[in-house]
Amino acid sequence: MSEDVDVVMESGAGGEGLVLTGPWGSERIGDAPPVVREALRRMQLGPVLLANLEPLPGGPMPRGCLSFVLLPVLDRLSHLVVRTLGVDDLGGPLLSVCPVSRSARFTPVRLPPRQPVRMPREVSLTPEDAGFALESELSPFRVVLHRPEAALVAALLAWPVTPDALAEALPLPREVTQGIVDYLAAAGMAAPVDDPDVTAASRLPARS
């Protein structure tokens, strides 16, 4: 969740469960375990690395709690959750994927390293106060590029290119480049190119 989506979280009637109110109405979570309440509370304050949720008062997080308790709730609330990609530095997030439709469902993808991809023609790029935004009438998401690294990867997707070629050409850690491309693909801002004729051209000069 984020101020970009404008979500308000409150306790349900009599303190039972939670009620989340967003741009497309209210969502009720009847049985909200402590880990769900804590995760949603932190997400209202900013980006959260779910794997780093601290043990809750009263004992450690039960084994499997993240996968079997929290993730299904977040999947149900996908249209209210902003996905943020970052790196372990002090430069802030690389990009954010913001839902703009009640039907938004973010499904992570992992593109094959030698699969040519490019930005669909329908995607538009708009300057922001800090960074750029990618939007498409065909996508239920809006992607905000917060840092030059993400903007550079997006710019090179104007032509068919493989994730491997991007990683070789850019002065970024390979996993960062791959992560940016994967997030853009999951948001509908990058798509595989299936024409075999473009494969040979999907290369960039490697950095010296």
Image (spheres, rainbow, N blue to C red):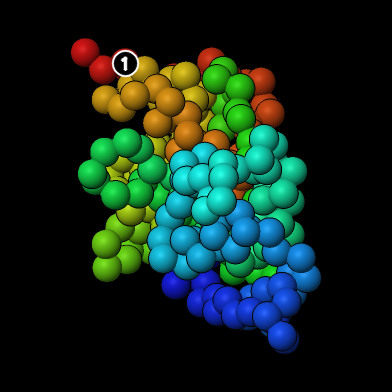
Residue 168 visible: yes
Q: Can you say which quadrant of the picture contains the C terminus?
A: top left
Q: Nearer the viewer, residue 43 or 112?
A: 43
Most extreme residue toward the bottom is 13
Residue 144: percent from left, percent from top = 42, 57
- Residue drawn 57% across the image and 26% down it: 116
Q: Circle 1 — which element?
A: loop
Q: Quadrant of residue 150?
A: top left
Q: Nearer the viewer, residue 22 or 206?
A: 22
- Residue drawn 67% across the image and 74% down it: 18
Residue 15: percent from left, percent from top = 68, 80
Left or right of 113 on screen, residue 107: right
Residue 124: percent from left, percent from top = 48, 59
Left or right of 82 on screen, residue 13: right
Decide: few, some or many residues near mark 1? Use Cα within 10 Å; few <14, some 14-19, many ≥20: few
Most extreme residue toward the right is 30
Q: What residue does disc 1 label? A: 206
Residue 122 visible: no
Q: Nearer the viewer, residue 81 or 142?
A: 81
* Above-or-below relation of 10 to 159: below
* Above-or-below relation of 48 to 44: above
Left or right of 180 on screen, residue 116: right
- Residue drawn 40% across the image and 31% down it: 176
* Amino acid of disc 1: Ala
- Residue drawn 31% across the image and 27% down it: 172
Residue 67: percent from left, percent from top = 69, 40
